[in-house]
Amino acid sequence: MAIERVVQLASIKHVGMSNLRDDWVSFVLGSPNEPDIFFSCVFKTELVTRLSLLMRGLVINIGPTYIPFPICI
């Protein structure tokens, strides 16, 4: 395992993950200069639980589908 990228916790706007046992997590940074982070984590529930304890008010989106931006129709 190698570190590919480091971000400050304060730069994470919200976390997204599915309600499936698929191990995928996204960190939405909301920065036009940096891409969002999408990665696999075997302990995604534990990771998000720890993040929510560290970052009060962190928005966590859990669902069968996840769209990180509003759709205007």
Image (spheres, rainbow, N blue to C red):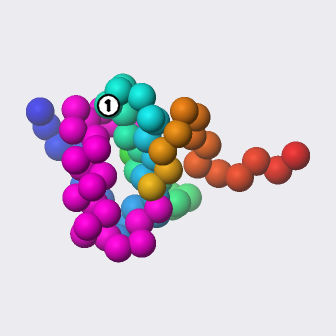
Query: Residue sitting at 22 percent across and 32 percent down?
Result: 42
* Residue 49 lies in the magenta-colored region: yes
Residue 45 image point, x, y percent: 28, 44
Q: How many marks?
A: 1
From the viewer's side, name the closer residue of 66 and 2: 66
The secondary element bearing badge 1 is classed as: loop
Give the quarter of the figure containing the N terminus.
Answer: top left
Residue tagged 1: 23
Residue 31 image point, x, y percent: 51, 61
* Residue 47 lies in the magenta-colored region: yes
The answer to which image quadrant residue 60 occupies is bottom left
Query: Residue sitting at 57 percent across and 40 percent down?
Result: 66
Query: Residue sitting at 42 percent across and 72 percent down?
Result: 57
Farthest residue in the left direction? Answer: 1
Residue 10 image point, x, y percent: 35, 70
Q: Does 72 sit above or below residue 39?
A: below
Viewer can see residue 22: yes
Q: Which amino acid type is shown beneath numbered disc 1?
A: Asp
CA neighbours of label 1 inside 10 A, class few (<14), some (14 to 19), many (20+): some
Residue 59 image point, x, y percent: 47, 62
Q: Is residue 12 left or right of residue 67?
A: left
Residue span colored magenta: 38-59
Q: Does 10 sit above or below residue 61?
A: below
